[in-house]
């Protein structure tokens, strides 16, 4: 009997030869992470149970990225809890503003998450790292507190769902469009409690940034995790990490797992995506995905390009390509947020930031900020935004009557120019 | 353990931004979080809810973010139990971990109306709708989760086993 990549990773971290869906396990963790919203609760709990020492100071990441740079006094005090705990316990992967980045872009960039790892994070988008062939999933602060103390976490082994994407991805589409399309097909609880495994020709030819966007949004279908089998593109990405001065010291061994040919899946979905249009999810659910062409009458007040879904270098590159030599519509506020300090520097050197600034956009230091209605771009009553983020729930970016449309960066950039939702082909030659 | 209270009903896919909007996440204070409970979907809920009351919702309750502030604000508001047709997974495990009683029952989720008086017996997984004279049996928890619940939450279990 065969096993999926997910079952193999979970078994390897449980000291068992195999695990089956439905089984409860206590697994050893390679990394656990928290941010300025979730870690303070975990730290409080950790201290309340009288724990004195963390299980391993090199396997904990604490990243103040949500309300940073500190947006108000309360946030400042939350972040202080993080930094004091990090220093007290000599936590290796604590990153201050200035070295910091959005957690799910930062950790892979620094080579801290590798294929075959088992990662939990007190942040729902922790599922992002599945793009590298790791099992990673979001948990709560109490789980994180327990992990700080024990280095373990309990799981119910998920059933897997296989998604096979056939055909070549058309121009102006990306991993974001694949995942919005998929969530549109199966719904916001279509993969509830399950592992989504992405494969097929379109995935095998997808760059790592796009794979991150896909796995990042597995949670928006209710999934426990999203995962892509590592291949040459994955290995090349990791090799590139190790060439960087900032990631070199994190070099370590990793294991590549692949699903067996006779692995069992709860469901298999096949999509021919060779004619896929860029997808836009209309308010107020990520599952409301539609072809961009059907929404060309929707006027917008704000554009956000960034987030753990789409704030990576290739996202900025395509947005810059669309905005080069153009001006943002006079009615529109355009906010570009490189996801990490290194992406910021690269985008600066490559001239993307100048293109954004010339176009009349602003460029912010890395932060989750507007995605969750935190700061740096809150919407007023009735305002409409198109964003490369991951959630468009009611009131997500601000006022309860405001609206968020989700898209890829090329569509967001084109929409910034037009002042309404637009296809990138409308503004490029 | 038993509970008794009035039902407050909600629809499908109630998300964590509705349960506790992100702008209130700059604190871990129970009282403050309780005062904003469900504010993203019903701005007067926190004032209306009485100790022991029950939230009854449709499918996929608690979808979205991992913020434990969501079940914590519900628990801190005095809600004795959340009944739903199904729960989003992180909300589900967070509730088990912090000891917010949750029950899964499609029938109860479908039947119960705003203001119905409910009697709940957690040990039996039984929900009695006093107003409508009906009885529902919730899905049983797996043994592993029963252990967390009976330990008084994940941290108490961890404390016993590891520390």
Image (cartoon, rainbow, N blue to C red):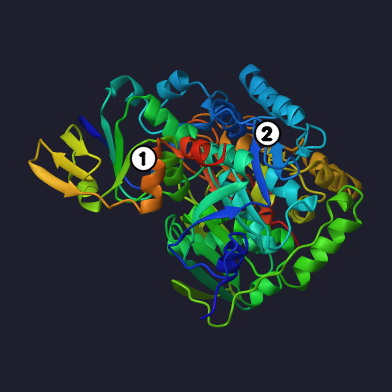
Question: Which residue has dot 2 on it?
Answer: A53
Is A79 situated above or below B83?
Answer: above
Pointer 1 local density, CA inside 10 Å: few below 14, some 14–19, many at least 20: few
Q: Secondary structure at mark 2?
A: loop
Q: Nearer the viewer, residue B33 or A368?
A: B33
Quarter of the figure with residue A427: bottom right
Quarter of the figure with residue B9: top left
Q: Position of residue A212 (x, y in %)?
A: 67, 57
In the rendered structure, the answer to whether residue A185 lies left or right of residue A321 reads: left
Quadrant assignment for the C terminus of chain A: bottom right
Q: Position of residue A52 (x, y in %)?
A: 65, 30
Q: Nearer the viewer, residue A409 or A6?
A: A6
Q: Secondary structure at mark 1?
A: helix
Q: Do the residues bearing badges 1 and 2 touch, measured as CB atoms within 8 Å?
A: no
Q: Position of residue A244 (x, y in %)?
A: 90, 53
Instruction: Output the chain of dot 1.
Output: B
Quarter of the figure with residue B129: top left
Question: Which residue has dot 1 on it?
Answer: B150
Is B8 situated above or below B58?
Answer: above
Same chain, labels 1 and 2: no
Name the disc covering residue A338, or none.
none
Q: Does any portion of residue A276 appear in the rendered image?
A: no
């Amino acid at each position: 009997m065969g096993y999926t990549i997910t079952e193999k990773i979970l078994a390897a971290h449980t000291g068992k030869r195999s695990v089956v869906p439905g089984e409860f396990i206590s697994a050893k963790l390679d990394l656990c992470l928290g941010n300025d919203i979730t870690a303070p609760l975990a730290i409080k709990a950790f201290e309340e149970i009288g724990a004195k020492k963390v299980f391993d100071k090199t396997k904990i990441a604490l990243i103040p990225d949500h309300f940073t740079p500190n947006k108000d006094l309360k946030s400042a005090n939350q972040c202080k809890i993080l930094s004091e705990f990090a220093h007290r316990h000599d936590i290796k992967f604590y990153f201050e503003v200035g070295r910091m980045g959005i957690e799910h872009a930062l950790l892979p960039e620094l080579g801290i998450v590798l294929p075959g790892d088992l990662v939990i994070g007190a942040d729902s988008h922790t599922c992002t790292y599945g793009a590298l062939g790791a099992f990673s999933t979001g948990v709560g602060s109490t789980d994180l507190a327990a992990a700080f103390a024990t280095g373990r976490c309990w799981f119910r082994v998920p059933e897997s769902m296989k998604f096979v994407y056939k055909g070549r991805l058309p121009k102006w589409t990306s991993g974001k469009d694949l995942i919005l399309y998929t969530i549109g097909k199966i719904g916001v609880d279509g993969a509830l409690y399950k592992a989504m495994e992405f494969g097929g020709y379109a995935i095998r030819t997808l760059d790592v940034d796009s794979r991150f966007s896909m796995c990042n949004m597995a949670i928006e279908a209710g999934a426990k995790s999203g995962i892509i089998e590592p291949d040459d593109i994955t290995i090349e990405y990791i090799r590139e990490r190790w060439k960087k001065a900032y990631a070199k010291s994190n070099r370590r061994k990793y294991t590549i797992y692949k699903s067996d040919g006779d692995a069992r899946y709860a469901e298999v979905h096949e999509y021919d995506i060779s004619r896929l249009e860029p997808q836009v999810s209309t308010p107020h659910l990520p599952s409301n995905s539609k072809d961009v062409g059907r929404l060309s009458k929707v006027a917008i007040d704000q554009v956000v390009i960034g987030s753990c879904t789409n704030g990576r270098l290739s996202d900025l590159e395509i947005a810059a390509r669309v905005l080069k030599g153009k001006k943002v519509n006079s009615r529109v506020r355009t906010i570009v947020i490189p996801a990490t300090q290194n992406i910021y520097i690269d985008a600066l050197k490559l001239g993307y930031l100048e293109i954004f600034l010339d176009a009349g956009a602003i460029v912010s230091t890395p932060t989750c900020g507007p995605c969750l209605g935190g700061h740096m771009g809150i919407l007023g009553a009735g305002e409409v935004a198109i964003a490369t983020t991951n959630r468009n729930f009611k009131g997500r970016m601000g006022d309860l009557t405001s609206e968020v449309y989700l898209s890829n960066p090329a569509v967001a950039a084109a929409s910034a120019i037009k002042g309404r939702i637009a296809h990138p082909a409308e503004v490029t030659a | 353990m038993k509970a008794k209270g009035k039902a407050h009903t909600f629809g499908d896919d109630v998300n964590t931004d509705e349960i506790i909007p992100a702008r209130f996440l700059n604190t871990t204070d129970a009282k403050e979080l309780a005062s904003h409970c469900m504010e993203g979907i019903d701005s007067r809920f926190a004032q209306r809810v009485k100790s022991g009351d029950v939230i009854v919702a449709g499918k996929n309750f608690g979808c979205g973010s991992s913020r434990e502030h969501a079940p914590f604000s519900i628990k801190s508001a005095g809600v004795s139990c959340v009944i739903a047709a199904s729960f989003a997974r992180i909300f589900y495990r967070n509730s088990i971990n912090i000891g917010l009683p949750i029950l899964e029952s499609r029938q109860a989720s479908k039947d119960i109306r705003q203001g119905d008086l409910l009697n709940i017996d957690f040990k039996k997984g039984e929900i009695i709708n006093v107003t409508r004279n009906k009885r529902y049996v919730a899905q049983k928890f797996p043994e592993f989760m029963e252990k967390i619940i009976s330990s008084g939450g994940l941290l108490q279990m961890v404390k016993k086993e590891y520390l």
